[in-house]
Amino acid sequence: MLAKSYMDRGELVPDALVILMIIERISQKDCADGVIFDGFPRTRDQALALERELREHGRKIDYVLYLRVPDDVLLRRIAGRQTCKTCGYIYNIYYFPSKRPDVCDHCGGKLYQRSDDTLETARHRLQVYFAQTRPLIEYYSGHGTLIEIDGQREISLVTEAMTLALGIHGSDAEK
Ligand SMILES: [Zn+2]
């Protein structure tokens, strides 16, 4: 509710509050064997604060997966993304197009593009990433926790490389 009060005002939720929510969530039973964070932390400050809190709760980050993808591919992945209005299936006009343009292969629903998935916003997001998030690669590399994965291959191969890196077996990953 506290986080919502920030979002309702159009403000960013402070890092300390986000981390508090994360700690609370991962303290639950279903996270006892470990968790994977996706998209967090995104800044060095967040990484430091997260590490501090985790340590206080007797936990730590074992691995950081870095999915390396060339910038131009990232831009096309974002700018080319299409989603089915009906079933939510995701396509990409460059890499994974539907058989008929703008029509879902699975359900025949209409495909749409998110308003924030344009080349311009993709470029902006990439700039924010370069400035704020990319320094984390060096940070975690220095900690010896970074595992680099070639993220330009097929989804199934990237998934395989990730589960292999984490020592997760196929059946565990599907849980
Ligand atoms: Zn569909």
Image (spheres, helix red, strand yellow):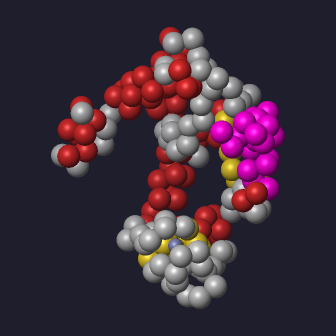
159 horizontally vs 131: left or right:
right
Q: Is residue 14 above or below residue 103?
A: above
**Residue span colored magenta:** 157-175
Q: To which quarter of the image does residue 63 belong? A: top right
Is residue 102 inside the magenta stretch?
A: no
Relative image position of residue 153 (x, y in whole percent) = 77, 62
Q: Is residue 50 above or below residue 160?
A: above
Residue at 50 percent of width and 25 percent of height: 26
Residue at 57 percent of width and 11 percent of height: 58
In front of the other: 166 or 142: 166
Q: Is residue 167 visible?
A: yes
User: Farthest residue in the bottom direction?
Assistant: 100
Q: Is residue 65 visible?
A: no
Q: Is residue 134 above or below residue 21?
A: below
Relative image position of residue 118 (x, y in whole percent) = 45, 73
Relative image position of residue 134 (x, y in whole percent) = 58, 46
In front of the other: 82 or 63: 82
Q: Quadrant of the N terminus?
A: top left
